[in-house]
Image (cartoon, rainbow, N blue to C red):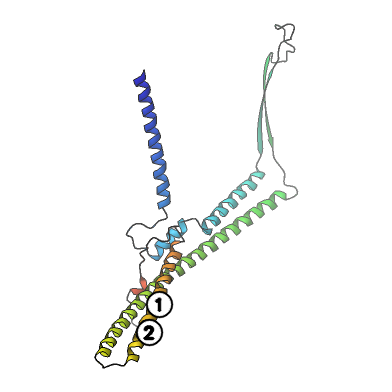
Amino acid sequence: MGNGRRSFVSEVLVKRHRRHSLLAALVLAGAAAGAQPAGKVLSLQDCLRLARQAQSSLTIARQQVEIARLAVSQVRAGFLPQSHLGNNFIYNSPLLHDRTTFSFIPLNAIREYSSLLTTTLELDSSGRLRAELARARAGQKVAEAEARLSERDLKRAVTAAYFRALLARHVLEATGDSLAEAQEFRRRAELLFEKGEAARADMVKAAAAVALLEQSRQQAELEARLAMQELASFWTTEVDQPIQLEDPLSEPPPAPEDA
Protein backbone atom coordinates (compact mmCIF):
# COMPACT_ATOMS: atom_id res chain seq x y z
CA MET A 1 0.00 0.00 0.00
CA GLY A 2 2.84 2.36 0.91
CA ASN A 3 4.72 1.62 -2.31
CA GLY A 4 1.60 2.28 -4.38
CA ARG A 5 1.05 5.60 -2.65
CA ARG A 6 4.67 6.66 -3.17
CA SER A 7 4.53 5.75 -6.86
CA PHE A 8 1.31 7.75 -7.24
CA VAL A 9 2.88 10.80 -5.56
CA SER A 10 5.98 10.46 -7.75
CA GLU A 11 3.83 10.31 -10.87
CA VAL A 12 1.96 13.45 -9.79
CA LEU A 13 5.23 15.29 -9.14
CA VAL A 14 6.62 14.26 -12.52
CA LYS A 15 3.48 15.47 -14.31
CA ARG A 16 3.58 18.76 -12.40
CA HIS A 17 7.26 19.22 -13.29
CA ARG A 18 6.52 18.59 -16.96
CA ARG A 19 3.64 21.04 -16.89
CA HIS A 20 5.80 23.74 -15.28
CA SER A 21 8.61 23.06 -17.75
CA LEU A 22 6.21 23.38 -20.67
CA LEU A 23 4.83 26.64 -19.27
CA ALA A 24 8.33 28.04 -18.80
CA ALA A 25 9.25 27.04 -22.35
CA LEU A 26 6.18 28.80 -23.72
CA VAL A 27 6.99 31.95 -21.75
CA LEU A 28 10.59 31.96 -22.98
CA ALA A 29 9.45 31.36 -26.54
CA GLY A 30 7.04 34.27 -26.33
CA ALA A 31 9.74 36.53 -24.90
CA ALA A 32 12.18 35.54 -27.62
CA ALA A 33 9.65 35.99 -30.42
CA GLY A 34 10.47 39.68 -30.76
CA ALA A 35 14.21 39.27 -30.28
CA GLN A 36 16.76 39.27 -33.05
CA PRO A 37 17.90 35.79 -34.16
CA ALA A 38 21.48 35.16 -33.13
CA GLY A 39 24.00 36.04 -35.82
CA LYS A 40 21.39 37.25 -38.32
CA VAL A 41 21.89 40.45 -40.26
CA LEU A 42 18.67 42.45 -40.21
CA SER A 43 17.48 44.23 -43.30
CA LEU A 44 14.96 47.04 -43.38
CA GLN A 45 12.15 44.58 -44.14
CA ASP A 46 13.19 42.44 -41.16
CA CYS A 47 13.05 45.47 -38.86
CA LEU A 48 9.61 46.40 -40.20
CA ARG A 49 8.36 42.84 -39.68
CA LEU A 50 9.63 42.75 -36.08
CA ALA A 51 8.10 46.15 -35.36
CA ARG A 52 4.71 45.05 -36.74
CA GLN A 53 4.73 41.92 -34.58
CA ALA A 54 5.62 43.77 -31.36
CA GLN A 55 3.16 45.61 -29.13
CA SER A 56 2.74 49.14 -30.41
CA SER A 57 0.12 51.66 -31.44
CA LEU A 58 -0.41 49.53 -34.55
CA THR A 59 -1.52 46.49 -32.55
CA ILE A 60 -3.88 48.70 -30.54
CA ALA A 61 -5.32 50.09 -33.77
CA ARG A 62 -5.85 46.55 -35.06
CA GLN A 63 -7.70 45.66 -31.88
CA GLN A 64 -9.89 48.72 -32.36
CA VAL A 65 -10.70 47.48 -35.88
CA GLU A 66 -11.76 44.12 -34.45
CA ILE A 67 -13.88 45.85 -31.78
CA ALA A 68 -15.57 47.97 -34.46
CA ARG A 69 -16.27 44.86 -36.55
CA LEU A 70 -17.90 43.15 -33.58
CA ALA A 71 -19.94 46.29 -32.89
CA VAL A 72 -21.35 46.11 -36.43
CA SER A 73 -22.27 42.47 -35.88
CA GLN A 74 -23.96 43.35 -32.60
CA VAL A 75 -26.07 46.10 -34.15
CA ARG A 76 -26.92 43.90 -37.14
CA ALA A 77 -28.25 41.27 -34.75
CA GLY A 78 -30.97 43.72 -33.72
CA PHE A 79 -32.68 43.19 -37.08
CA LEU A 80 -33.01 39.44 -36.45
CA PRO A 81 -35.72 37.70 -34.39
CA GLN A 82 -34.88 37.25 -30.71
CA SER A 83 -35.89 33.88 -29.22
CA HIS A 84 -36.12 32.93 -25.57
CA LEU A 85 -36.90 29.52 -24.08
CA GLY A 86 -38.10 29.32 -20.48
CA ASN A 87 -38.45 26.07 -18.51
CA ASN A 88 -40.41 25.74 -15.24
CA PHE A 89 -40.80 22.91 -12.75
CA ILE A 90 -43.57 22.79 -10.13
CA TYR A 91 -43.68 20.29 -7.27
CA ASN A 92 -46.81 19.99 -5.11
CA SER A 93 -45.77 19.30 -1.53
CA PRO A 94 -47.98 17.13 0.77
CA LEU A 95 -50.04 18.51 3.65
CA LEU A 96 -48.35 18.97 7.00
CA HIS A 97 -50.90 16.97 8.96
CA ASP A 98 -51.31 14.26 6.31
CA ARG A 99 -48.19 13.43 4.30
CA THR A 100 -50.13 11.14 1.97
CA THR A 101 -52.38 13.92 0.72
CA PHE A 102 -50.94 16.63 -1.49
CA SER A 103 -52.02 20.22 -1.14
CA PHE A 104 -52.93 20.73 -4.76
CA ILE A 105 -53.13 18.48 -7.79
CA PRO A 106 -52.78 20.31 -11.12
CA LEU A 107 -53.37 18.87 -14.52
CA ASN A 108 -49.94 17.24 -14.60
CA ALA A 109 -50.31 15.64 -11.17
CA ILE A 110 -47.69 16.05 -8.43
CA ARG A 111 -44.84 17.21 -10.67
CA GLU A 112 -45.42 19.61 -13.50
CA TYR A 113 -43.00 20.64 -16.24
CA SER A 114 -43.70 23.58 -18.50
CA SER A 115 -41.73 25.20 -21.32
CA LEU A 116 -42.41 28.45 -23.13
CA LEU A 117 -40.72 29.54 -26.36
CA THR A 118 -40.97 33.26 -27.11
CA THR A 119 -39.87 34.88 -30.37
CA THR A 120 -39.88 38.65 -30.81
CA LEU A 121 -38.93 40.84 -33.77
CA GLU A 122 -38.44 44.57 -33.43
CA LEU A 123 -39.84 46.65 -36.28
CA ASP A 124 -37.54 49.58 -37.03
CA SER A 125 -40.34 52.05 -37.59
CA SER A 126 -38.39 54.98 -36.11
CA GLY A 127 -35.10 54.24 -37.91
CA ARG A 128 -33.14 53.79 -34.67
CA LEU A 129 -31.65 50.43 -35.64
CA ARG A 130 -30.65 51.69 -39.07
CA ALA A 131 -29.00 54.73 -37.52
CA GLU A 132 -27.08 52.55 -35.06
CA LEU A 133 -25.95 50.29 -37.91
CA ALA A 134 -24.78 53.26 -39.97
CA ARG A 135 -22.92 54.62 -36.96
CA ALA A 136 -21.25 51.26 -36.30
CA ARG A 137 -20.16 50.98 -39.93
CA ALA A 138 -18.78 54.51 -39.84
CA GLY A 139 -16.87 53.64 -36.66
CA GLN A 140 -15.46 50.57 -38.40
CA LYS A 141 -14.23 52.69 -41.31
CA VAL A 142 -12.64 55.16 -38.89
CA ALA A 143 -10.88 52.33 -37.04
CA GLU A 144 -9.58 50.88 -40.31
CA ALA A 145 -8.30 54.30 -41.38
CA GLU A 146 -6.56 54.78 -38.03
CA ALA A 147 -4.96 51.35 -38.38
CA ARG A 148 -3.62 52.26 -41.82
CA LEU A 149 -2.30 55.57 -40.50
CA SER A 150 -0.65 53.82 -37.55
CA GLU A 151 1.00 51.31 -39.87
CA ARG A 152 2.23 54.12 -42.12
CA ASP A 153 3.62 56.09 -39.17
CA LEU A 154 5.29 52.99 -37.75
CA LYS A 155 6.88 52.17 -41.10
CA ARG A 156 8.14 55.73 -41.48
CA ALA A 157 9.55 55.82 -37.94
CA VAL A 158 11.30 52.44 -38.28
CA THR A 159 12.74 53.39 -41.68
CA ALA A 160 14.05 56.70 -40.33
CA ALA A 161 15.57 54.99 -37.28
CA TYR A 162 17.14 52.31 -39.51
CA PHE A 163 18.95 54.75 -41.78
CA ARG A 164 19.77 57.02 -38.83
CA ALA A 165 21.56 54.09 -37.20
CA LEU A 166 23.45 53.33 -40.42
CA LEU A 167 24.41 56.97 -40.86
CA ALA A 168 25.60 57.20 -37.25
CA ARG A 169 27.75 54.12 -37.79
CA HIS A 170 29.29 55.62 -40.94
CA VAL A 171 29.98 58.87 -39.08
CA LEU A 172 31.65 56.87 -36.32
CA GLU A 173 33.85 55.05 -38.83
CA ALA A 174 34.79 58.30 -40.57
CA THR A 175 35.59 59.96 -37.24
CA GLY A 176 37.73 56.97 -36.26
CA ASP A 177 39.67 57.19 -39.54
CA SER A 178 40.20 60.92 -39.05
CA LEU A 179 41.40 60.32 -35.50
CA ALA A 180 43.87 57.68 -36.67
CA GLU A 181 45.27 60.06 -39.29
CA ALA A 182 45.50 62.87 -36.73
CA GLN A 183 47.35 60.62 -34.30
CA GLU A 184 49.78 59.61 -37.05
CA PHE A 185 50.30 63.29 -37.94
CA ARG A 186 50.95 64.12 -34.28
CA ARG A 187 53.51 61.33 -34.06
CA ARG A 188 55.32 62.68 -37.10
CA ALA A 189 55.19 66.22 -35.72
CA GLU A 190 56.73 65.04 -32.46
CA LEU A 191 59.54 63.28 -34.34
CA LEU A 192 60.20 66.36 -36.45
CA PHE A 193 60.17 68.55 -33.34
CA GLU A 194 62.68 66.28 -31.62
CA LYS A 195 64.99 66.59 -34.65
CA GLY A 196 64.48 70.35 -34.80
CA GLU A 197 62.70 70.28 -38.14
CA ALA A 198 59.29 71.47 -36.81
CA ALA A 199 58.18 74.23 -34.49
CA ARG A 200 56.51 73.65 -31.13
CA ALA A 201 53.39 75.34 -32.46
CA ASP A 202 53.00 72.60 -35.08
CA MET A 203 53.23 69.91 -32.41
CA VAL A 204 50.70 71.72 -30.18
CA LYS A 205 48.36 72.18 -33.12
CA ALA A 206 48.57 68.46 -33.95
CA ALA A 207 47.89 67.51 -30.31
CA ALA A 208 44.89 69.86 -30.20
CA ALA A 209 43.50 68.29 -33.37
CA VAL A 210 43.84 64.82 -31.82
CA ALA A 211 42.05 65.93 -28.64
CA LEU A 212 39.23 67.48 -30.66
CA LEU A 213 38.81 64.36 -32.78
CA GLU A 214 38.82 62.15 -29.67
CA GLN A 215 35.89 64.14 -28.31
CA SER A 216 34.16 63.91 -31.68
CA ARG A 217 34.70 60.16 -31.72
CA GLN A 218 33.22 59.75 -28.23
CA GLN A 219 30.22 61.80 -29.29
CA ALA A 220 29.85 59.71 -32.46
CA GLU A 221 30.01 56.50 -30.40
CA LEU A 222 27.25 57.79 -28.12
CA GLU A 223 25.07 58.85 -31.05
CA ALA A 224 25.57 55.49 -32.79
CA ARG A 225 24.65 53.63 -29.61
CA LEU A 226 21.54 55.75 -29.06
CA ALA A 227 20.51 55.27 -32.69
CA MET A 228 20.80 51.49 -32.35
CA GLN A 229 18.81 51.55 -29.11
CA GLU A 230 16.11 53.68 -30.73
CA LEU A 231 15.80 51.19 -33.58
CA ALA A 232 15.71 48.16 -31.28
CA SER A 233 13.08 49.76 -29.04
CA PHE A 234 10.47 49.22 -31.76
CA TRP A 235 10.37 45.46 -31.10
CA THR A 236 12.25 44.62 -27.89
CA THR A 237 12.97 45.94 -24.41
CA GLU A 238 16.56 44.64 -24.47
CA VAL A 239 17.90 47.63 -26.39
CA ASP A 240 21.50 47.11 -25.23
CA GLN A 241 21.86 43.90 -27.24
CA PRO A 242 24.12 44.31 -30.31
CA ILE A 243 22.31 44.48 -33.64
CA GLN A 244 23.77 43.63 -37.02
CA LEU A 245 22.21 45.64 -39.82
CA GLU A 246 22.39 45.21 -43.54
CA ASP A 247 24.05 48.32 -44.93
CA PRO A 248 22.68 49.43 -48.31
CA LEU A 249 24.69 52.67 -48.01
CA SER A 250 27.96 50.79 -48.48
CA GLU A 251 26.80 49.08 -51.65
CA PRO A 252 28.03 50.52 -54.96
CA PRO A 253 25.52 52.70 -56.77
CA PRO A 254 23.69 51.10 -59.68
CA ALA A 255 25.10 51.57 -63.13
CA PRO A 256 23.41 54.29 -65.18
CA GLU A 257 20.96 53.07 -67.74
CA ASP A 258 21.83 53.49 -71.37
CA ALA A 259 19.90 56.21 -73.09
Q: Which residue is drawn at 33% across and 91% down?
A: 200
Q: Tell me which amino acid carries mark 1.
A: Gln
Q: Quadrant of residue 60?
A: bottom right
Closer to the camera, 97 or 125? 97
Marking on residue 227:
none
Q: For the residue labelled by badge 1, is the local secondary structure a helix, a strand or a loop?
A: helix
Residue 89 sits above or below residue 28 on the image: above
Q: How far apart are marks 1 and 2 (CA)?
A: 11 Å
Residue pointed to by mark 2: 208
Q: Residue at x 39, y 40 (%)?
A: 22
Closer to the camera, 199 or 251? 199
Count of numbered circles on the image: 2
Q: In which quarter of the image is the C terminus?
A: bottom left
Q: How crowded is mark 1: few (under 14 residues within 10 Å), some or many (20 or more)?
A: few
Q: For the residue labelled by badge 2, is the local secondary structure a helix, a strand or a loop?
A: helix
Residue 154 sits above or below residue 111 on the image: below
Q: Which residue is drawn at 38% across and 58% down?
A: 36
x and y, in percent, of residue 252 in the image: 32, 76
Q: Is residue 75 visible to us here?
A: yes
x and y, in percent, of residue 208 in the image: 37, 84
Q: Residues within 10 Å of mark 2 (few under 14, many from 20)?
A: some
Residue pointed to by mark 1: 215
Q: Tell me which amino acid carries mark 2.
A: Ala
Q: Which residue is drawn at 26% across and 90% down?
A: 192
Q: Quadrant of residue 90?
A: top right
Q: In which quarter of the image is the N terminus?
A: top left
Closer to the camera, 49 or 233? 233
x and y, in percent, of residue 91 in the image: 68, 17
* Badge 1 or badge 2: first in the primary sequence: 2
